[in-house]
Image (cartoon, grey):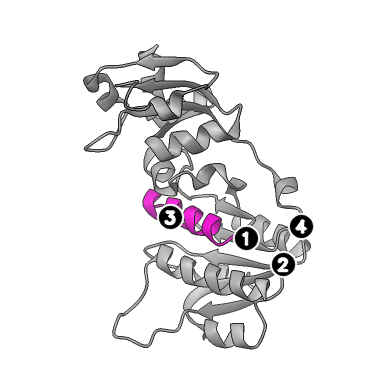
Amino acid sequence: MLRSVRRLTQRRGRDVAGKFLAEGRQAVREALAVGTLVEEVIVDDPERHADLLEGIDVPVWRATEHQMRALSDTVTPQGIVAVCRQLEYGWADLAGARLVVICAQVRDPGNAGTVIRCADAFGADGVILTTGSVEIYNPKTVRSTVGSLFHLPILTGVPLTEAVDRVKAMGMKVLAADGDGAPLDLKAAAGELSGPVAWIMGNEAWGLPEEDRRLADEVVAVPMWGGAESLNLSSAAAVCLYATASAQRR
């Protein structure tokens, strides 16, 4: 059994099986809350995780500490892993969306996971990972979402041009986050963030190429008044999402 589970630590194994691993107490708790997503749970000490395991209707297997380490890419595993079926979402799941994040070739798993977590925190209706972005079921991505992976629709492998065309057809204004754009605070003050908005967030290393910027209705920058040269991707996403969500709730 553990041999087949161990295959899910590699992308090929995940693709073939249509499954992935959710590691850690928070991720397992959120996966179990979905209802029919989790197929089995592996733990090193059932008593330590008794609160999570009580009343669940899936097989629970016990593994040694050594075996648990083989399922984890962390230095100090939390001793609990859930085997989950991969989530399936389509454009219909974004019908009526008012706030969406489009990650354009975001390749760092930690950044992608944190953007998903920010989107969840600020009430976004979905996230789109374009072609060339990190695999959503990469263990580091899953862990970085801290359970938010299970809270909102996430579309993957979508070409950026298709993503933009789709959200525009849904009546959304498309804003590209970039340091050379119009100030975010002025946009918010003018009421320009109160309608449905889709944010394009670029790659960590090279940002948004000019051809991608041209796909947006407007380029917007997070104003900075201190000495920092720039914000990292997830920090910029958090600010843009907070400003937009705040404007939409007024």
Q: Which mark, residue 96?
A: 4
- Say which quadrant the C terminus sits in: bottom right
- What is the distance, in whole Å, between disc 2 and disc 4 at their CAs? 10 Å
Q: Give the range drawn in magenta.
A: 105-123
Disc 2 to disc 3, C-alpha distance: 23 Å
**Can see residue 12?**
no
Nearer to us in this view, 45 or 234 = 45
Q: Distance between the residues labelled 1 and 2?
A: 9 Å
Kindly indicate whether the residue at mark 2 contacts the one at mark 1 (C-beta within 8 angstroms). yes
The reply to whether callout 3 and callout 1 are in contact (CB within 8 Å) is no
Q: What residue type is labelled 2?
A: Met
User: Which residue is at a point 49% across and 43% down the rendered structure image?
Assistant: 136
Q: CB atoms at circles 4 and 1 under 8 Å apart? A: no
Picture coordinates of residue 35, whole percent (x, y): 60, 29
Displayed quadrant of residue 23: top left
- Residue depicted at 67% across the width and 81% down the height: 192
- In the depicted structure, whether residue 85 falls above or below residue 111: above
| 103 left or right of 228 in image | right
